[in-house]
Image (cartoon, rainbow, N blue to C red):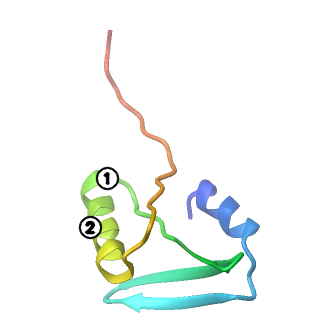
Amino acid sequence: MPEELAHLIHLLPSNDITHVTIKDFQFSIYNYRSKKILLAPTGIGTAFAGIVVTLINEYFDPDYLFFIGTAVTNCKE
């Protein structure tokens, strides 16, 4: 699990979680201050991340999407 995701999960209440499985993907939805928050790792690579985000968007219809992580490039000046 990416450290950014682990940190956010640690901040959310662990007693009010709904687990949802769609195909081979498992999602945890946290209830926080009357809001539902779904945290999901999207893996490495834009193609797989796009698949996961599309799946989340189709099944859950979120009001907001936030992406957290790092990106690295190997370009020379």
Quadrant occupied by the C terminus:
top left
Q: Position of residue 72 (x, y in %)?
A: 41, 34
Going by the numbered disc 1, the residue's amino acid type is Gly
Which of 59/35 is in front? 35
Report, in whole angstroms, how far the alpha carbon at label 1 lies from the one at label 2: 10 Å
Residue at which label 1 appears? 45
Sequence order check: which comes first, mark 1 or mark 2? 1
Left/right of residue 52 with respect to residue 20 in the rendered view? left
Where residue 76 sits, quadrant-wise, is top left
Number of numbered markers: 2
Question: Which of the labelled discs sits on residue 60, or is there none?
Answer: none
Q: Position of residue 34 (x, y in %)?
A: 67, 80
Going by the numbered disc 2, the residue's amino acid type is Ile
Left/right of residue 52 with respect to residue 8 in the rendered view? left
Which of 20/33 is in front? 33
Quadrant occupied by the N terminus:
bottom right
Where residue 16 sits, quadrant-wise, is bottom right
Answer few, some or many: residues within 10 Å of disc 2's Cα (few below 14, many 20 plus, some between 14 and 19).
few
Secondary structure beneath dot 1 equals loop
Secondary structure beneath dot 2 equals helix
Answer few, some or many: residues within 10 Å of disc 1's Cα (few below 14, many 20 plus, some between 14 and 19).
few
Question: Residue at position x 34%, y 86% from top?
Answer: 24
Question: Residue at position x 26%, y 67% from top?
Answer: 51
Residue at which label 2 appears? 51
